[in-house]
Amino acid sequence: QVQLVESGGGLVQPGGSLRLSCAASGTIFSIEAMGWYRQAPEKQRELVAVIISGGTTNYAESVLGRFTISRDNAKNTVYLQMNSLKPEDTAVYYCNAGVLTTRFRGGKYWGQGTQVTVSS
């Protein structure tokens, strides 16, 4: 019913920048929160940043001041601008969205993930 497609991952040197995008498509009545999670090898998936429909944002302490989440409601797309990247930011980054498919029905959806590797 709902698909999330991420793009923008890759290999970058420490101190560099990347911008991730995630576009939602399918049967969408409205999108509440959109966010980014990441999972490093042998670690649990963790929240990186989230933005709700009104624009309020929340970040993991480890990325505060370096990452910025934003969304384009007209395009059902969320972005993650990542600056001053560190090797410990290396992980698979997943997009997540809370989507209403009708006025009274919805669910949480995940993208397929995009690899971000920070290495010299």
Image (cartoon, helix red, strand yellow):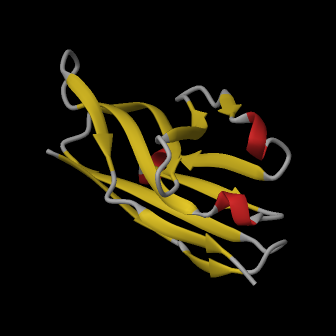
Instruction: Measuring from the top left, give residue 106's x and y in whole percent.
Output: 23, 25
Camera-side residue: 111 or 21?
111
Left or right: 107, with 115 as reference point: left
Q: Which residue is drawn at 80% across and 41% down?
A: 64
**Residue at the extreme front of the image, as rendered:** 42
Left or right: 93, with 98 as reference point: right
Image quadrant containing the C terminus: bottom right
Image quadrant containing the N terminus: top left
Q: Residue at x 70, y 58 (%)?
A: 88
Left or right: 51, with 24 as reference point: right
**Residue at the extreme bottom of the image, as rendered:** 120
Q: Which residue is drawn at 74% across and 51% down?
A: 67
Residue 118 occupies which quadrant of the picture?
bottom right
Left or right: 114, with 68 as reference point: left
Q: Is residue 81 above or below residue 50?
A: below
Camera-side residue: 100 or 43?
43
Camera-side residue: 104 or 45?
45
Instruction: Measuring from the top left, give residue 7's x and y in whole percent.
Output: 46, 70
How many discs mark residues in the rendered view?
A: 0
Residue 47 occupies which quadrant of the picture?
top right
Instruction: Measuring from the top left, give residue 98's x and y in whole percent.
Output: 36, 31
Instruction: Measuring from the top left, give residue 63's x and y in whole percent.
Output: 75, 46
**Residue at the extreme top of the image, as rendered:** 104
Residue 17 occupies which quadrant of the picture?
bottom right
